[in-house]
């Protein structure tokens, strides 16, 4: 369970982050990845997922220990769905900043397998606005 932080405390945490993590927190690519993850997993409350991922990037919530628990609790979802969201968050958001997160948390972050990457990317590759090529 995460502590409650004030807005000023979050900004202080942000100010002390390495540049790579600061960029990930405010990146449009991070926002798009969160939106895609929520769409793929039928999660309506994107804001809560964004808050949880933000807490991981800020150093408040460990991606290894508490991420699944927080997803389950705050979104009221199954462990299976929370683990799937975690897997996708690691692949598309956390893995690109892996070294900075490992230094911040003093842990090793799991790397997704090639098979898992390909399987998940297939779910994100469909573009609803394009017509099929014949």
Image: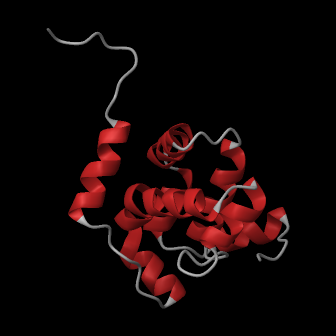
Residue furthest left in the image: 134
Q: Nearer the viewer, residue 24 or 68?
A: 68
Residue 61, position as x, y percentages in the image:
65, 75
Report the quarter where the C terminus lies. top left
**Left or right, residue 8 beside residue 79:** right
**Left or right, residue 64 beside residue 29:** right
Q: Nearer the viewer, residue 55 or 12?
A: 55
Residue 10, position as x, y percentages in the image:
74, 67
Q: Nearer the viewer, residue 113 or 46?
A: 113
* Residue 93 drawn above or below residue 47: below
**Left or right, residue 57 beside residue 90:** right
Q: Nearer the viewer, residue 89 or 3?
A: 89
At 68% from the left edge and 71% from the top edge, which residue is drawn? 69
At 37% from the left edge and 66% from the top edge, which residue is drawn? 95
Quadrant assignment, res 100 = bottom left
Residue furthest bottom in the image: 106
Quadrant assignment, res 60 = bottom right
At 23% from the left edge and 59% from the top edge, which residue is drawn? 115
Report the quarter where the N terminus lies. bottom right
Quadrant assignment, res 17 = bottom right
Residue 93, position as x, y percentages in the image:
44, 58
Picture colour scheme: secondary structure
Residue 133, position as x, y percentages in the image:
17, 12
* Residue 92 drawn above or below residue 62: above
* Residue 97 drawn above or below residue 28: below
- Count of labels in the image: 0
């Amino acid at each position: 369970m995460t502590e409650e932080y004030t807005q000023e405390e979050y900004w202080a945490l942000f100010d002390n982050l390495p540049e790579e993590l600061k960029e990930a927190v405010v990146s449009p690519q991070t926002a798009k990845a969160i939106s895609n993850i929520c769409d793929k997993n039928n999660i309506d409350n994107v804001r809560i997922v964004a808050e949880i991922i933000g807490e991981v990037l800020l150093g408040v919530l460990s991606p290894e220990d508490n991420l699944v628990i927080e997803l389950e609790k705050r979104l009221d979802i199954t462990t299976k769905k929370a683990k799937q969201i975690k897997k996708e968050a690691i692949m598309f958001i956390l893995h690109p900043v892996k070294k900075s997160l490992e230094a911040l948390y003093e842990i090793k972050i799991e790397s997704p397998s090639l098979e898992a990457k390909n399987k998940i990317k297939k779910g994100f590759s469909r573009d609803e606005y394009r017509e099929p090529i014949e």
